[in-house]
C-alpha cells in the first residue's frame, strides 16, 4: 500500500485532480480497524433502534438488526463489485488487448510502459474507486425503505409510520457515514 502512495507521489493532504479530489488513504491497520468498527456499529445501531419500541418480538428485533448489517454488507459488496469493474476496465482489459494482439496478430508490445497504465490513469482509477463508496448511501435508501416497510407490519405500541421513519432515517444516516469515510479511504480497497 505504501508503494503506490510513494510512486504516485500523493501528498498526505491529498491532491485535486481533473477527476475529483484524491484523498490520501490512511494506513492499512487503520482501515482494518475502521472496517471492524463499522460492522460493530451496524450491530450497535440495530440494538439501539430495536430497543426504542420496548415491545418488539425477537423476530422483529432481528429484522431491525438485519437492516443495518445489510446496509454495511451489501454496500461493501456493491463497492467491491464496482471497483472490480473499474480494475478490469483500467488495468486488465488493456493487458488482455496486448495479449490478444500478441497471440492472434503477432504484434509484440513495444515496451513495458505500453503494458502498464499511465500515472494519470492510475490516479483516475483511484479517484473513481474512492467515489464508488457512494454505493453505501444509495443502497441505504433502498434497504431503509424496504426495512421500514417491513416494520410497518410489526405489532408494536409505537406508531408504524414513526417506526418506518426511524428505520429509514437511521439506515440512510448510517449509509451516508459509511459513504463519507469510504470516500476518504477509511475502508480498505478489496484489491489490496
Image (spheres, rainbow, N blue to C red):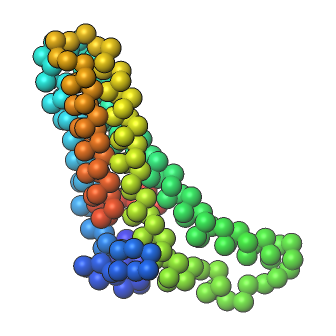
Q: Residue at x 78, y 84 (%)?
A: 108
Q: Is residue 177 visible?
A: yes
Residue 35, image x and y in percent?
A: 29, 51
Q: Is residue 155 above or below residue 188?
A: above
The N terminus lies in quadrant: bottom left
The C terminus lies in quadrant: bottom left
Residue 30 lies in what quarter of the image?
bottom left
Q: Residue at x 53, y 57 (%)?
A: 84
With 109 as the anchor, is 106 left or right in this view?
right
Q: Is residue 65 above or below residue 153?
A: below
In the image, 139 versus 34, the foreground residue is 139
Q: Residue at x 61, y 87 (%)?
A: 113
Residue 183, image x and y in percent?
A: 33, 62
Q: Is residue 46 above or below residue 122?
A: above
Residue 13 lies in what quarter of the image?
bottom left
Residue 133, image x and y in percent?
A: 39, 56
Amino acid at each position: 500500500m505504501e508503494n503506490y502512495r510513494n510512486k504516485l507521489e500523493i501528498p498526505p493532504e491529498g491532491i485535486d485532480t481533473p477527476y475529483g479530489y484524491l484523498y490520501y488513504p490512511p494506513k492499512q491497520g487503520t482501515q482494518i480497524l475502521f472496517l471492524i468498527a463499522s460492522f460493530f456499529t451496524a450491530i450497535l445501531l440495530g440494538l439501539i433502534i430495536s430497543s426504542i419500541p420496548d415491545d418488539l418480538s425477537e423476530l422483529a428485533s432481528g429484522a431491525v438488526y438485519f437492516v443495518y448489517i445489510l446496509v454495511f454488507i451489501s454496500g461493501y459488496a456493491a463497492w467491491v463489485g464496482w471497483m472490480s469493474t473499474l480494475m478490469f476496465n483500467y488495468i486488465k482489459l488493456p493487458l488482455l488487448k496486448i495479449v490478444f494482439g500478441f497471440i492472434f496478430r503477432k504484434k509484440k508490445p513495444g515496451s513495458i510502459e505500453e503494458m502498464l497504465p499511465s500515472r494519470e490513469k492510475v490516479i483516475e482509477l483511484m479517484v473513481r474507486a474512492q467515489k464508488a463508496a457512494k454505493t453505501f448511501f444509495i443502497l441505504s435508501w433502498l434497504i431503509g425503505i424496504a426495512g421500514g416497510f417491513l416494520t410497518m407490519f410489526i405489532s408494536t405500541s409505537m406508531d408504524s409510520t414513526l417506526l418506518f421513519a426511524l428505520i429509514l432515517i437511521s439506515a440512510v444516516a448510517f449509509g451516508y457515514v459509511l459513504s463519507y469515510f469510504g470516500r476518504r479511504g477509511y475502508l480498505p480497497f478489496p484489491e489490496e
